[in-house]
Amino acid sequence: MTTSPTATSDTPTPYAIVAGYGLPGRATVEWLQRHNIEFCVVDLNPQTVSRCARHDLPIIEGNIKDEQTLRRAGIERATLLALAVPDEQTVRDATVLARRLNPSVYIIARMNFTSGGLQAVRLGANEAVVAEQAVALEFARLLSNKFG
């Protein structure tokens, strides 16, 4: 991956860590690729890591809430950490650790419930994507389409 040509000497070179390579992680990676932003994916599943590495995806095996894993992924230089894993405790733990290792990293946390999203932000995430809120919006959209 190449870095964004719009970066200046005053702007940190964009670099992202994506935790989890399920549907949310893949969507994040596709966006990063479209914007020529360098990244590293971290995933627990050795089969996923092996399969993706064969296709030259920058990916490492590990638990995102582990300090050594975050360091191997490049947390010190990361400008974005996308915590796309479905386990809320892992997201909370990784948020606290990443914030300690890199106070300026922009953290997006995946959470299931609004209360979890609020907690993730209190722990240091910049944004939280909350599943129940996304489902609520989709219900409203579908109802509007069907019943106007």
Image (tube, rainbow, N blue to C red):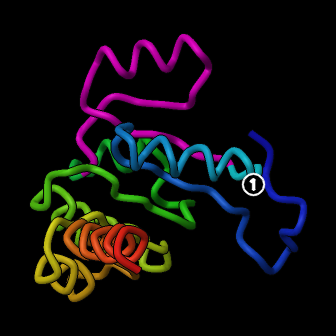
- At x 81%, y 80%, the residue is 10
Where 55 sits versus 80, above or below? above
Of residues 44 and 23, the one drawn nearer to the viewer in this rendering: 23
> Residue 48 magenta-drawn?
yes
Residues shaded magenta: 38-64
Amino acid on which disc 1 is placed: His
Residue 50 on image: x %, y %: 41, 13
Residue 45 on image: x %, y %: 26, 25
Where 74 sits versus 137, above or below? above
For the N terminus, the quadrant is top right
- At x 47%, y 31%, the residue is 59
For the C terminus, the quadrant is bottom left
The total of numbered circles placed on residues is: 1
- At x 13%, y 61%, the residue is 88
Where 40 sits versus 44, above or below? below
| Residue tagged 1 | 35
Q: Quadrant of residue 44?
A: top left
Of residues 102 and 39, the one drawn nearer to the viewer in this rendering: 39
Tell me: 79 left or right of 65: right
Tell me: 13 left or right of 28: right
Q: Residues within 10 Å of mark 1 (few under 14, many from 20)?
A: some
Where 35 sits versus 108, above or below? above
Residue 18 on image: x %, y %: 44, 49
Judged from this view, the residue extending furthest toward the front is 147
Tell me: 102 left or right of 62: right
> Residue 61 magenta-drawn?
yes
Tell me: 7 left or right of 121: right
Q: Quadrant of residue 126?
A: bottom left
Residue 87 on image: x %, y %: 14, 52
| Secondary structure category for the residue under label 1 | loop
